[in-house]
Image (spheres, rainbow, N blue to C red):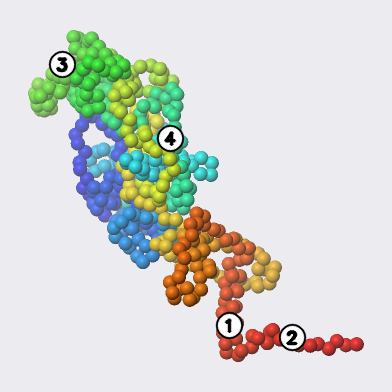
Amino acid sequence: MKATVSAAPVSAGPPHTGIPLWRTAAALWPDLSGQAGPAILRFAGDDFMERLHETLAEGGGGLRDLVAANETWRGPAPGGRLKLYQPVHGRFYLVAAALVCPRLWYPDKRIDASKRESAFFVLRRQAAGGTELAWVPEGQGGSWRPAPVGGLAESEQRLPLFAITYQEVSGPRRLLAGLVPVSAREAYEGGRARPPAAPRPGDPMGAVTDTRLGPLMAVVGGLQALRAAASQGHGAAGQRRESLFFALIELGAWLKEQLPKVRAADSGLGTRQAALLARLMKKDGFATGRTWLDALKTADTPGTGAASDAAASGGAEPPPVAGMSGAAIEAAIAALGVELPGPPGPTQVDPAQTTFFTEAAAAFTEAVPATAREAAAVSDLQGPGVYVLRCAYERPRCPDRLTLSPPSQPFTLAPFHDPDAPYRSTRIPTPGDVSLAGLRKHPKSVAVTVSRQLRAQLERIQNVRLADLDSGNVPDAPQVSLGMVCQLSIPIITICALILLMIIVGLLNIVFWWLPFFKICLPTVEAE
C-alpha cells in the first residue's frame, strides 16, 4: 500500500519550527484524512496481536477494516455512540497512531530513550462544557481531576505504547499502539471527581499547562537556537536575519491574540502585564535607539511581508532586521532574556530568575480568565462516562517537552453484563472425576447478581396469583434502592447436573409412573 498524504500540507514557517506531530496510523491517512487523532482498532478474538502483525506484514492496508464501529450481539449497528466491550465478550481494542516530523510526507519521529524521551497514551473522561478529566490512580481505585489544556494532570495514569515497524510501498513505517483497558471500566465509572491538584512549588514550567502557551514556547525556543547560531557564526547572515524576522511576526501575532493590551501598550495594566511591557520597551533592547516593541510594530506594518518576499528573491530586507549583524542579533536576543527553564542539571535556569518567558506566562495567567476546565464540578459524576484517548510524546530536555495528540473518537465502556454485548463461544466441560473427593476440587464461587430493577419486579409479583394476572390486579413495584448478590457454595457444574437430573426424573415419571413408589414404606421382619 502506498501511503499518500491527503492531509493539509505543513505551512511554511521559520527554520526553527520542528515540533513533532501526532497523526492517526499512516495506513489510514487516505481514508481518514480529516482525523488527526489516534484511531481505535477492534479485534474479535484472543489472537489480536497475531492479526495485527499479519495485517501490517501485508502493508497495513487491512487496518481500515479493523477501525472500531458500533456493534451489538446482532451485528454491526451503524450510527450512535461507539461502545467498547470487554475481553470477556471476546473484544479487544488497540489505540493506533503515528508520531511524525512536520516535513514533507511526514517521516516517523525517532524516540530517543537515552534522552528520557517516551511515548504513551492517556484515558480522559469528558465532562460538561468540554472539560476533560484525567484519571489519577489512588490505591485500589482512583479519582478524576481536571486536565490542563495541552498538558497532563499531576500523577495522571500513563498507559504504555509499543512500536511495530512494517513495510509500505513508499518505505518503512512505524505504528505506535496500546491496549485500551476496557476491563477497568468499573474502577473508572466508580471514580469521583476531585479539584485540580495544587501546582508544585518552585516548578519553573508550572505555567506551561495551557495549550495557548505552546506557540510562545516555540518562539522562545527558536530565539534561543538563533542566539546560539549567531554567537557561533552558523548559517548565512541573511538566513539569521530572516529567522529573526519570522520570530518577530510570530511573537507579535501571539501577543495580539492573547495579550492585546500589552501589544498596544495600553494603560491600566495589571502588575504582571506591566512588567512584561516594561521588558519589551526597554531602551536599546532590540538595537540602538529601538525597543523590542518597536521592532514588533515595524514587522507588523502593512507591506513588510512584501519586503520579506523581496528579500527571498535577493531584494531589500525587511526593515526590522535589515543589515543586522550576527553580534547585533545575539545582543538583541540576550537583552530580551529568552532563557527557558530546563531539566534538572548544571544548565538549569534558577526558577527564581525572571525571564521573558516567565514574565509572559505570568502576564497571560493574570490577563486570561479561568476557563470552565478550572472550575470543573467536584460532585460525583452521574451516568455512564464518555471517554476519549490521547497519545503523548514527552522529551524533558526540550522547551516543548510535551506533545499531546488530538482526541480519538468518543466512546463508552460496556459493563460486564451488557445486554447488547457480543458473545464468545463458551464450553463448560463436565468433571471427569465424579467422586466426592474429585467434586470438592472444583471452585465454589458461583454468584448471581440481581439488579435493583429486577429485585423490584420480583418483590412486585411475590404474592401474585394466576387469577390476579388474568384480572390485571398486579400491585406497583415497590421502591427498592439496593440490588442483591446471591452467593452459592456449590460449583456451577453441580447446579447444571441437578437441573438435568430433575428433568430426566420428571420424564421417566411420566412414562413409567414409578416415582411415587419411592414414598412407600414397607414393613421389615427382624430376626429373633
Marks 4 and 2, how far apart at CA:
75 Å
Element class at badge 1? helix
Q: Is residue 54 visible?
A: yes
Marks 2 and 3, how far apart at CA:
122 Å
Q: Which mark is residue 334?
A: none
Q: Which mark is residue 323?
A: 3
Residue located 53% across and 67% down the image: 462
Q: Earlier in the sequence, mark 2 or mark 1?
A: 1
For the C terminus, the image quarter is bottom right
At label 3, the amino acid type is: Gly
Q: Which one is closest to the eye, mark 2 or mark 3?
A: 2
Q: Position of residue 505 (x, y in %)?
A: 60, 82
Crowd band around label 2 with a 10 angstrom C-alpha radius: few (<14), some (14–19), many (20+):
few
Judge whether 439 appears above or below 364 on screen: below
Element class at badge 2? loop
Q: Which one is closest to the eye, mark 4 or mark 2?
A: 2
In-front residue for pair 132/343:
132
At label 4, the amino acid type is: Pro
Residue to which mark 4 is pinned: 195
At label 2, the amino acid type is: Cys
Residue located 39% across and 29% down the image: 397
Residue to which mark 1 is pinned: 506
Element class at badge 4? loop
Q: Label 3 near label 1: C-beta < 8 Å? A: no
Residue 149's image quarter?
top left
Residue located 50% across and 61% down the image: 455
Residue to which mark 2 is pinned: 521
